[in-house]
Amino acid sequence: MRILISDTNWTTAALARDLRAAGFFVTEANDGEELIEFALNGMQDAILFDLDLPDMKGADVLRSLRAILPHTPICTTGAKVDGTLRVKLMDAGADDVFARDTDGALIAAHLRAFVRRTNGFATPLLRNGSLEIDLSAQSVSIQGTPLHLTRLEYELIEMLSLRSGILVTREMIMSQLYAWEDEPDPKIIDVYICRIRSKMAALGAADDLIHTSFALGYRIDLPAPAAMAA
């Protein structure tokens, strides 16, 4: 998962570190204007920013972000968070409001839950036949056997799974994996997919777990949440 976070004080810098340690890809913005720019132009699974921004009021940034991304989880942090502030910000579009001293692991758990529920999944376990993705453990298995993936390979599988049934283009994948930083040739995505398929096949997976639309992108189809719960 990729999280857009404001890097405007020591607290958010520490949160960025904690989120990376929890397995997130992190895009850091220096102010409110950059938060909005990155939200407009990149793939973000969720957004976390501190209300104390150097250039804009936090509530104004929140309203702008929510107008751009009506379904993306957006959370804020603040120095003094009380019930009145939480109500105000949640009415303005925030999914949650955290005090700055909130444990980073707890914030990470909230973000994971928000992201998976936004995509229609009630639990961290996503399944399609022999394929199982555990979003909390950040692991993939085939017929119960762990599938050993690189960090980027796992992120690619997770991205396709969370967007089950939707064609994900190479451009979307590049934005998710690299976020404009040191981007290789987009053809590298084909290489990743080939490697993942080979690893899956070695564990006896079906050939059609990952669907290809020639020159467009890739898709993983998971059962609807209601079907998985049945």
Image (tube, rainbow, N blue to C red):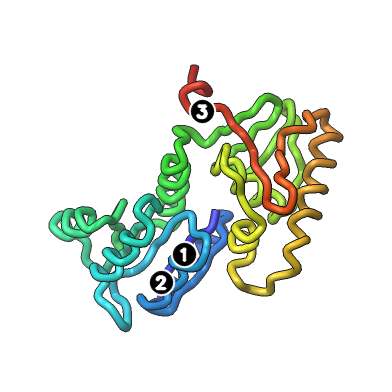
Percent position of residue 82, x then y = 17, 58
| SS for dot 3 | loop
**Dot 2 crowding, Cα within 10 Å, few <14, some 14–19, many 20+:** many
Q: Residue at x 65, y 32 (%)?
A: 132
Q: Which mark is residue 4?
A: 1
| Alpha carbon distance from label 1 to label 3 | 28 Å
Which callout, 1 or 3, points to the residue nearer the camera? Answer: 3
| Alpha carbon distance from label 2 to label 3 | 33 Å
Q: Amino acid at mark 3?
A: Ala
Between residue 156 and residue 79, name the one nearer to us.
156
Left or right, 144 with respect to 221, comes to right
Percent position of residue 159, x then y = 59, 48
> Marks 1 and 2: CB-CB under 8 Å?
yes
Left or right, 48 with respect to 140, comes to left
Left or right, 148 with respect to 181, comes to right
Q: Residue at x 75, y 33 (%)?
A: 208
Percent position of residue 103, x then y = 40, 56
Earlier along the polypeptide chain: callout 1 or callout 2? Answer: 1
| SS for dot 1 | strand
Residue 134, quarter of picture: top right
Q: Amino acid at mark 2?
A: Leu
Percent position of residue 85, x then y = 17, 60
Q: Residue at x 59, y 63 (%)?
A: 175
Q: Is residue 153 above or below residue 35?
A: above
**Dot 1 crowding, Cα within 10 Å, few <14, some 14–19, many 20+:** many
**Dot 3 crowding, Cα within 10 Å, few <14, some 14–19, many 20+:** few
| SS for dot 2 | helix
Q: Which mark is residue 35?
A: 2
